[in-house]
Image (cartoon, rainbow, N blue to C red):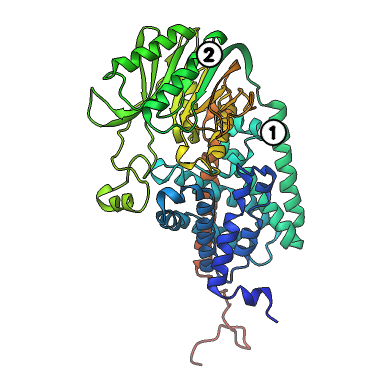
Amino acid sequence: MKTVGQWLASPWRRSAIAVLAGALPLVAFPAPSLWWWAYVALVPWLLLVRSAPTGKRAAYDGWWGGFGFLVAVHHWLLPSLSVFIFLIAALLGALWAPWGWLVHRFLGGVPGPGRVLAALAVLPSGWLMVELVRSWQGLGGPWGMLGSSQWQVAPALRLASVGGVWLLSFLVVAVNVCVAVLVSVRESRVPAVAGLVATAAATSAAWVWSPRPDLDGETRIAVVQPGVVVGVDKRFDREVQLTRSLAAQHPDLIVWGESSVGYDLAGRPDLAGRIAALSRETGADIMVNVDARRSDKPGIYKSSVLVGPDGLTGDRYDKMRLVPFGEYIPARSLLGWATSVGKAAGEDRKRGTEQVVMNVGHGLRVGPMVCFESAFPDMSRHLTQDGADVLIAQSSTSSFQHSWAPEQHASLAALRAAETGRPMVHATLTGVSAVYGASGQRLGSWLGTDDSTARVYDIPLATGTTAYVRFGDWPVHGAILVLALWCAFEGARAVRLRRPTPEPHVPPARTVHESPARPGR
């Protein structure tokens, strides 16, 4: 009968197990949203990698696990990208190869307490480097960051206000490393337990000492979600109908979802006039989202546009970070064939150049983002620094209506709210729409993918500055420092080992008459 080690000797079997192990964190994210699973989800992957016979094989296990992780958290893209999703996952999965080598380097064999303590700093730092690189919007952006699985856990949200989603990812990986050591290395359980205690202490300290948002006033913001309506004109009519129903509720701002208007309003004064009439009727400015070719400059833009009682206010935000393949094709001359195998963009959208904070009246300043820009912590942080009282994301996941994508996308706003200490509104065309308070707590119920409605939310406003807004991505900088110090230590050790050891000095032999012996005599 084969042992587990013999069965895993096959590279193909190891690779298949690595793919499955890498995919395990999926259920920690919405829709299942088993947040607690994130703290043990990496353990099978860690145990597999540490058992690798060589560092090279461990790197392959990291690569294949990264492939499984990316396919799992982006599985809802399969109808749009077809087989292309596997190619992208294979390329980006290589980011986990160095991490796999690090796991083997620190946890392979029987690591002593010192090596385990070092692993608790180096391995989470290595994971953060992977998340940092793949967070570049050209590589798909920070979707599925491990820390974002904690969006509904109050202590984790408090930690997010200190170090952002980066700090959460670091601590989640550290806990997984501790559990893996407890399971597999009896000799080093003491430092593993110490790591768990330190994590609990850090969480408790953040809960007690991190500043809470200072509540100051309240605003009423309405979300208009038309639901699945075929045709841009019919959708516009439905949005008008739903918005008119808000007249008696006196909102301060009304928000429509992404691509809620399919025409450039500067070129369609009739549509702009209808929205302005709604603004007069409801007493609130209306933020719509235009996905259309502009009349004043070439190209298609996706833009947040503010309309007041007198028409277009002039406030406009053009989306800066576009979805690869969905809104543009990277290196189109080389990869343009993707349009023939999936729902890739037939024409590239144009990018905006700067973020915008809009004054919508009633003393309220809002910071708009569009679609997956809500996944980027730096964008909401910059809007907060620029004076936004409320963060707003206009989104549409209608192409993925029956997948886990709408719930995952809606959950990201909770992290952005907690990080910045500012409430956030996530308004969509077809669900899920959601609103969160300044601490990341959910306000009211979600508008699900079956809802076609308009709803008003009473949102407490907050002041003050969180540690994350003030100090930014300091966990990332700390991770870089940890890795740099480790590399310097390893380099110094390598030099010391390569330095030739001087031969011991041997005194010359003496004759019986106590005189030095002469060679040759």
User: What amino acid is labelled 2 in the image?
Assistant: Leu
Instruction: Kindly report the distance in space between the C-alpha atoms of the residues bearing marks 2 and 1.
Output: 36 Å
Q: Is residue 512 above or below residue 361?
A: below
User: What amino acid is labelled 1 in the image?
Assistant: Pro
Q: Is residue 114 above or below residue 376?
A: below
Residue 199 visible, this orientation: yes
Displayed quadrant of residue 107 = bottom right
Answer with mark 2 or mark 1, whichever residue precedes in sequence: 1
Horizontal relation, residue 292 to residue 518: left or right: left
Which mark identifies residue 459?
none
Horizontal relation, residue 440 to residue 244: left or right: right
Label 1, secondary structure: give it: helix
Query: Residue drawn 58% across and 45% down?
Result: 146
Query: Residue drawn 63% across and 20% down?
Result: 213
Q: Nearer the viewer, residue 103 or 444?
A: 444
* Contact, mark 2 vs mark 1 (Cβ under 8 Å): no
Label 2: how many Cα within 10 Å (few below 14, some 14–19, many 20+)? many
Label 1: how many Cα within 10 Å (few below 14, some 14–19, many 20+)? some
Which quadrant, please, contains the N terminus?
bottom right
Horizontal relation, residue 293 to residue 24: left or right: left
Q: Nearer the viewer, residue 485 or 320?
A: 320
Q: Which-is-in-front pick, marks 2 and 1?
A: 2
Q: How far across and down, in percent of the image, does residue 226 sit? A: 48, 27
Displayed quadrant of residue 517 = bottom right
Residue under pointer 1? 155
Residue 488 visible, this orientation: no
Query: Residue drawn 39% across and 14% down?
Result: 275
Query: Residue drawn 61% across and 40% down?
Result: 168
Q: Is residue 483 above or below residue 263?
A: below
Residue under pointer 2? 246
Label 2, secondary structure: give it: loop
